[in-house]
Amino acid sequence: MTDLLVARNVSKTYFDTVANDNVVALEDVSLAIRPHEFVSVIGPSGCGKSTFLRMVAGLDKPTAGEITVSGRKITGPGADRGMVFQEYALLPWKTTAANIEFGPRLKKLPKAEREAITRRFVELVGLKGFENKYPHQLSGGMRQRAAVARVLANNPTVLLMDEPFAAVDAMTRQHLQEELTAITARERTTVLFITHAIEEAVFLSDRVIALSGRPGRIVADLAIELPRPRRWDALVNDARFAAYRDELTRCIHGTKA
Amino acid sequence: MKAARTLFAELFPFAVAVAIWQALAMAGIWPKVLFPSPLEVAQTFAADLASGVLLVNLAVSLKSLLLGFVVGCAIAVPLGYLMGLSRASRNFFDPLVNLLQAIPGLAWIPFAILWFGLGQGAVTFIIVMSVFFPVLHNLLTGIRMVQPVLIEAVRTLGANRGDVIRHVIFPATLPNLMTGIRLGIAFGFRSLVGGEMIASTDGLGYAIFNAQQYFQSARIVVGMLAIGIVWLAMDRLILRPIEQRTTMRWGLVREGLEQA
Ligand SMILES: Nc1ncnc2c1ncn2[C@@H]1O[C@H](COP(=O)(O)OP(=O)(O)OP(=O)(O)O)[C@@H](O)[C@H]1O
Ligand SMILES: [Mg+2]
């Protein structure tokens, strides 16, 4: 199968105006992601994970190298690369339903179709009954699910997620992780997922890419061959799950020393 | 029942203020001309209402205020978005705006009279100058405070520049725009009264000024109260309902922080 997302020798250098110095955030990163693959990127804080995701989204430009999606070079943001932000970034002036309907509305889909899509994704993320609530009336976990639904409803080719579950409690997080794997398996979405939680990466992914400390370089690229659908109660005592987790832990700590 | 309780809560502070005022007037500490009693004011109010003079002055003043407000906003709001969204126009207009900003609306009176003659034209002009800056300034502050992540989020949903302006920047700047509008009207009232005292022969400001010439202190208070009542009515009937339906419903602005 041909690759969907390709990064070739991507580097990113920020200019620190205060220190009057260059900060190399990411150095010579190359990777390829196949359609329908769920790929997580892990690495220590400040290693350039968000930077990489933002470049894929088209919100930042690489200093060197290039990134292509479906063979086309990324020049700016687009609906084909939907992003879920750590801060949810729901529009406070739109209800849950209106937030989810936003992408289809920009695409000028007919009203009936938009409403059908909205209903479907509201149900998919379990927000039925909260369609007419504004984001400030939702719990953190509900906001996160609404943000995921908003992006999924826009049917992106690639779903980009930047530590989306970092701010929710452990129980909600496990629940959201299970939901996410189920949804993306059903929708056959390609996902690029950023986290610094190793277990989360193993649980969700088909592949986990580990970055070294700043400047970020790829130090491991590990295929996770655990059966789907995945559930925490089954995997928590699974020897293969533990083996993947330990291997990634070793990779990350090896680079820190 | 609930409506009655709300009305009571609304009126209660006024009842307290009037009671204290009446008690002070009855104590007879100051001569009546320096400190008219609420009763006298009420009588004058009723008389001026019956003779129609109050409503005529009110109509004249409101017309100047509304016209000045609309013209001031019609320039300030588009200019604010233009300056907020384009660096070139910001670089061009910002120094000019800053130079003019500190000049009070009333300082324009001499030119207003030279250009428009004595009358409501001159008054309207200085109201425009008074409304313009608070509206522009608050709008610019609002634009600077728009969260970049909201813009980025809608861009990754396929929004173009026009969509970003319509769906993010307009609603996000509404709380500050409302603040600007409130301040604009408040500044407009100040200039209205001051302007009418100097540059006009009718309107509430002129009526207050004129009453002072004849030592009609109750009539002065009637003019002041009329302004207060008009402002209160604008707030309760127009501005608040708008906020309740928008910025408050969206959770961007709260009633207060009593939970703190
Ligand atoms: N706009 C910017 N200007 C200057 N430096 C930046 C900017 N954005 C990021 N950096 C620097 O680039 C490096 C990588 O940042 P990035 O946000 O990608 O890290 P991260 O891997 O996502 O970290 P975390 O896990 O803490 O979110 C950091 O050293 C950061 O200081
Ligand atoms: Mg980050």
Image (tube, rainbow, N blue to C red):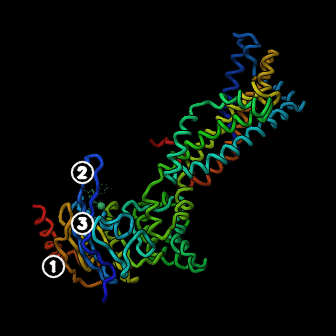
Q: Residues within 10 Å of mark 3 (few under 14, many from 20)?
A: some
Label 2 chain ID: A
Residue at which label 1 appears: A239
Label 2 Cα neighbours within 10 Å, binned few <14 / some 14-19 / many ≥20: few
Q: Is residue A43 above or below residue A33?
A: above
Residue B112 in percent (x, y) is at 72, 32
Say if residue B166 shows up in the picture.
Answer: yes
N-terminal-most mark, 2 or 1: 2
Check disc 2 and report its element: helix, strand or loop.
strand
Q: CA distance from mark 3 to mark 1?
A: 18 Å
Would residue A252 appear left or right of A1 to someone viewing this image? left
Res. B40 visible in picture: no
Disc 2 versus disc 1: nearer the observer: 2
Residue that badge 2 annotates: A21
**Tag 1: residue type?**
Ala
| Location of residue B99 by image quarter | top right
The residue sitting at 79% across, 26% down in the picture is: B206
In 3D space, how far apart are the residues under numbered discs 2 and 1 (Cα atoms)?
A: 47 Å
